[in-house]
Image (cartoon, coloured by chain):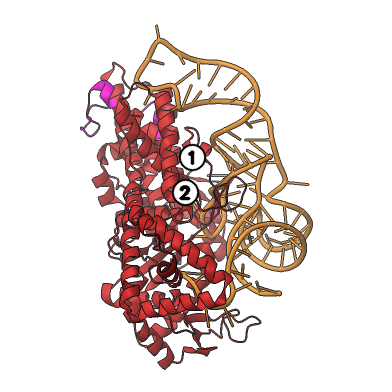
Chain colours: A red, B orange
Amino acid sequence: MVLPFNVAAEIENAVKAAAAQAGFDLALFAPDVRPADPAHGDFQANGVLAYAKRQKQNPRALATQLVGLIALPADTFAIEIAGPGFINFRLTPAALQDWLTKYDSEEHLRAAAASAYSGQTWIVDYSSPNTAKQMHVGHLRSAVIGEALCRLLAFSGAKVIRDNHIGDWGTQFGKIIWAYKRHLDKAALAADPLAEFERLYKVGHSASEADDAVMNEARQELVKLQAGDPENREIWHQIGAASLSAFQTIYDQLGIKFDLTLGESFYNDKVDQVYRELTACGLAEDSDGALVVFHDEHPRFSRHAERPQPFLVRKSDGASNYASTDLATILYRTEQIGATGAFYVVDKRQGDHFEQLFLTAKKWFEKTGRPFPRLEHVDFGTVLGEDGRPFKTKSGENIKLKDLLNEARERCFKLVTEKSPDIPEAERRNIAEVVGTGAVQYADLSQNRSSDYLFSWDKMISLEGNTAPYLLIAVARQYSIFRKVGLDPAAPLTGASAFETPTELALARKLVAFPSALNQAATSLRPHFLCTYLYELAGAFSTFYNADKVAVDEPGVRTRRLLLCARTLVWLETGLHLLGLRTLQRM
RNA sequence: GCGGGGGUAGCUCAGCUGGAUAGAGCAACGGUUUUCUAAACCGUCGGUCACGGGUUCGAGUCCCGUCCCCUGCGCCA
């Protein structure tokens, strides 16, 4: 038989078919196929155990019955039952080799990849910085995780729309315009507009913190801006242009290209409809002059809660806020873009906001007879410094993203110069850029996004452990081998003999698990599952590389080892590119 | 007070709807290069999975209780 790319899915189908034949209740039975510990097999199906428990039957007996019905040919899989009822599947060496021979390019992988999102249109709302300020380390995770998810979703069959929902309409503009009119330094504005806007923001912010009268004036400036006052509009426009141009430099480095940049201002003329409809359907009400939504069925968002926590959709001064524009945004994305749903890649501390937002939107859509899209808050934790507190400079300032990426590049340049002094400087600069940026991205992606993580230069730039440089060097070595033997890594390889050594077999088996890792990362929206897999794959390769010399004389051995290198190369590069990293042929 | 997340080796982290002997990396100690990049590889050491109960063939994972840490809770986003 010809194995499909996704071997686990093939086994899953076969087990499901056998279960149907055996009379299992398919509503309660899931095969649960996953890559196995190599000691047991290549894949295992654990679903029988859970099913037997529910049905109060002997799992071992059920597994035996099932295995007798599984229609997978013996020349492809060895199947056995172990322990209480695990079903283990091991590919025969010939099947393994056929699989590796057949699937050989990124395009091939893409076409064959599990189509977890096929036919769906997803908006990914990520990065979303505020204008008038430089991006800092707090903006790193949304950008890096968001981009990786976009690539994973697209690879899994989705149509992805990248939307940068910039904060270009919030209270900060009241403060900054207030300061602009009183404290503008024209020379500084000409020299570095974003830095000057940032300074003005700080002036306005501290003045309004210190003095309620200033706070009120700042609020009035915001109301004037939102009402279309020409002077305020012009200042606002300058700020936006300077900000976007600075953001783009960072995005270029991180490989990010947005399809849409529809910030809060875009929804300025769309929030009245929100107020009107929410009020008309009885969801929103006046509270101390503000328009708020309560959810009485909810323990905390109810008006009867001990400390009521309403969803505030319009401020008492009449200005819109995050909630108003977010509601308008959901409507726009549903009606104008026709999205299946939206993923919000936003700090987990905003969890309550999204819970209230989704709850409010759901009721609003139901009451107005609109189909409700799938909305999900893809949350992430905080980047911490070595002291376990949010990562800041020594003086307590936010670390600018630009400075962070520059430092990564500098550190890597020093390293590559030390390790590979013979490479010309221009190339070393490029290597430093790719490795440094990649190290920062990978450090962020390789940990479960929901947790906080400790930012450590030494750890992320290390060549040991689960790091970008470790994976990138594995890629560079594979290119090096192909340079050595004078072959194109993409060239077809024929005449391979059968895999023999334990390290060859271990690497080959690891390669087959790629679709499972990809699928797990894409469906759970957690890129670290892919990182873990790539790290294990690179580890299996490194072990193989040290144990089995590729460029040997015997043509059969040489070809089969080149085959392993060629596939590992495509797998690693595809995986790293899906994460948003670039790869190198030499470092 | 109420909510959310967390506590796994000295440190940083994995552990996928309960599954096979709880895994990596760092640190410590020892070894490998006339051979494709030693930026690598191999080995040793290291665990009361916060604590106490419970559920069952089986619990780091589920339930109950306790302690500790982070985090959110009206006009910020």
- Residue at 37% across, 77% down: A225
Of A98 and B68, nearer the camera is: B68
As for residue A318 lying within the magenta part, the answer is: no
Q: Residue A57 carries which label?
A: none
Residue A564, horizontal then vertical, whole percent = 33, 32
Name above or below for residue A451 compared with residue A327: above
Residue A72, visible in the rendered structure: no
- Say what amino acid the circle numbered 1 marks: Met
Residue at 39 percent of width and 61 percent of height: A126
Quadrant assignment, res B72: bottom right
Camera-side residue of A391 and A174 = A174
- Mark 1 crowdedness (10 Å alpha carbons): few <14, some 14-19, many ≥20: many
Q: In this view, does B74 lie to the left or right of B40?
A: right
- Magenta residues, start to end: A482-507
Residue nearest the observer in this picture, B70 or A396: A396
- Dividing the picture into quarters, in which one does residue A539 lie? top left
Compare marks 2 and 1 and give the one earlier in the sequence. 2
Compared to residue A292, the image places residue A518 above or below, namely above
Please state the horizontal and vertical placement of residue A317, each as a whole percent of the image. Answer: 47, 84
Q: Which residue is drawn at 59% across and 45% down?
A: A386
In the image, residue A36 sits, relative to residue B63, either above or below, namely above
The residues bearing labels 2 and 1 have C-alpha atoms spaced at a distance of 9 Å
SS of the residue under disc 2: helix
Q: Which chain carries label 2?
A: A
User: Which residue position holds label 1?
Assistant: A460
**Mark 2 Cα shell of 10 Å, populated few (<14), some (14-19), many (≥20):** many
Label 2 sits on residue: A444
Q: Position of residue A510 (x, y in %)?
A: 41, 39
Please, what is the dominant secondary structure of the magenta stretch?
A: loop
Q: Is residue B16 left or right of residue A438?
A: right
User: Residue A91 at x, y = what percent?
Assistant: 38, 40
**Mark 2 is on which residue type?**
Asp
